[in-house]
Image (spheres, coloured by chain):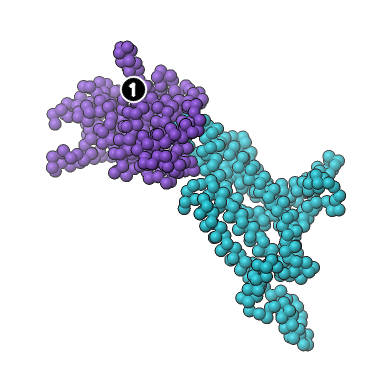
Amino acid sequence: MTGQTSSRAEIPVLSVRDLEVTFPTPDGDVQAVRSVGWDVYEGEVLAIAGESGSGKSVSVMAAMGLLPATAQVSGSIAYRGRDVLAMSDKDLERLRGSSISMVFQDPMTSLNPVMAVGAQIAEGVRIHQRVNSRTARSKAVELLDLVGIPNPSQRVDSYPHELSGGMRQRAMIAMAIANDPDLLIADEPTTALDVTIQAQVIDVLERAREATGSALVIITHDLGVVARIAHRILVMYAGRAAETGIADGVFERPSHPYTAGLLGSIPRLDAPKGTRLMPIEGAPPSMLAPPPGCAFAPRCPRATPLCSQEIPELRPIGNQESACHHGEDQYNEAEDV
Amino acid sequence: MLGFATRKLLISIVVLFFATLVAFLLVATVDPIAEQRVFLLSQPGGAEQVQRLEASLGLDKPLIERYGSWLGDLFAGNMGASTDNGRAVTTLLGEAISVTMRLVIAATVVSVILGVAVGVVSAVRQYGAFDNISTFFAFLFFAMPVFWLGAVLKDLGIRFNDWWGRRIFFTIGEQSPRLEADFWGTWADRAGHIILPALTLVLIQLAATSRFQRSAMLDVLESDYIRTARAKGVPRRRIITHHALRNALLPVVSFTGLTFGTLIGGTVVTEVVFNWKGMGRLFLESLLNGDVAVTQGWLLAVGISVIVVNLLTDLTYGFLDPRVRDG
């Protein structure tokens, strides 16, 4: 019995392989995602981190089948072994909101302004479960209570404009977990919120994940969020994976100069007095014509001529995987400090 | 919702008061006896005659007093009598409105329903064949003057009747004169008369409404909450009917309310083209005859109808959008 459960746990809930997403524009093709792969296992929290435009959101939108029709997608995305990219619209509709669900970035615009929040939650329940409207409504009240909205039996009839940003994001989370999904995807869930409520919303997300036992993929550029809840991390840069591994390990000994740069640019309470923040100089490359070789090379303190010629493949370094020609040097330097 | 409705109603009453002032002043500041005055003053003893004429029409009193007595009569349900034929203005307006409303209501209902349907389909299948064809016709009819489109339809209607060998479309009047028919016969006759003038108004109104609905729908379909609905697994058809349409109706509701005045103007022209004895003809005749009481009454009646329509627009908007209700 135990053997079965453990082997089942080895099958990823979602497996992304060699994913490439290109958007044709009048100025040329924007290569938003250039060959990325990741897995997320049952009950696990995976953080995808990176700057704006690094392809974090696009790769999960592809997994939900939510990209615009103009997007050209190749590679494979498998939900429990079933190819999501090959699914019919009907199968996708069945998958979305029941097996995989999503919390979006901006709760101000992501809720329908003319529908009561309870009705929006109940709608998701009724689409995927055969229940009557009374049951769906009481389920909505339960969910609102679970995500910590006070007076849920009254709030169920509130319209989005009557709720604060934090409350709306809680309602979004309630909507996302309404059908006990296997996988919850949160796309920058705290970016649009006040700093003071960001931590609360992360707690609610964590609680919601525990209540449903789902896996969680959280997309963020806030490494504080990653440190707080993620088991594993995938750092993306210019549409590719830069580094991936156990979150704590990557934080302790980054094996990619970009990860090290990200960590060096966050203020830390435990840093010695007088330590300066180290911003990463320059800007991410244009995805219309990314540089040959390593996309980070133009900004990288370790760059050598090799870097601008040959694209570094993701390879194991220590317990992590890094896509850097000088990954070992970075990894070992971190140990010395 | 009740508080919202009450607030809107009170505002409407204030606007209504100003409408009476404007309707009165627009007419009262024009000298109704300008021609006689010139003629009489050139005659010996004409000055006294002018004075007598002014006194009989009440023109010797100050403007504010004249407004006061006009308003007082108005509240008593008396809008004066036509100087042309002596009939009460309320009777004349009542007859004309019942004819015109038939046309306006038919044109509004048909153009809004068709406009919303065409706009939604165009937006959902953007740049498809239907969208391109409807775009072409929308611009074609939008650019046409009402009187010309009316005349063209009239001509086509007559040609069709000749070809068919029976009279399907009537091109003159709102119903056949001296018609003796039962209830259904009367309505069939009226329907034959209303098709072409209503079509004139519908085609022009439909052009604008469908374009408006299309762009509103396209905006809404791009919005984040539609993406949320898709992420929930809501089927496409339900997204369009339950999530997108209700939001996309809001601008069209405002638009329909705002263009109601334009529609009345278009109706006046259409009535003249098709010889209807409605508000259009009443207005033109009152102007040509210098029939002060009728012109004032007419302006007020149209003003009231615009106010009522805008009140209905606001209430519909409040019904559709909870944010407006609380605002």
Left or right: residue B236 compared with residue A240: right
Q: Is residue B282 visible?
A: yes
| Amino acid beneath label 1 | Glu
- Specify the quadrant of the image occupied by residue A151: top left
Label 1 Cα crowd, 10 Å radius (few <14 / some 14-19 / many 20+): some
Q: Which chain is purple?
A: A
Left or right: residue A159 compared with residue B182: left
Q: Position of residue B143 (x, y in %)?
A: 65, 50
- When the figure is inspected, residue B269 is found, relative to residue A197, above or below; the finding is below
Q: Position of residue B201 (x, y in %)?
A: 69, 50
Residue at 49% across, 33% down: A134
Chain designation of label 1? A
- When the figure is inspected, residue B248 is found, relative to residue B34, above or below; the finding is above
Q: How many marks?
A: 1
Quarter holding the N terminus of chain A? top left
Please identify which colour was used for chain B in the image: cyan
- Specify the quadrant of the image occupied by residue A177: top left
**Pointer 1 residue:** A42
Quarter holding the C terminus of chain A? top left
- When the figure is inspected, residue A154 is found, relative to residue B176, above or below; the finding is above
Residue closer to the observer: A213 or B229 = A213
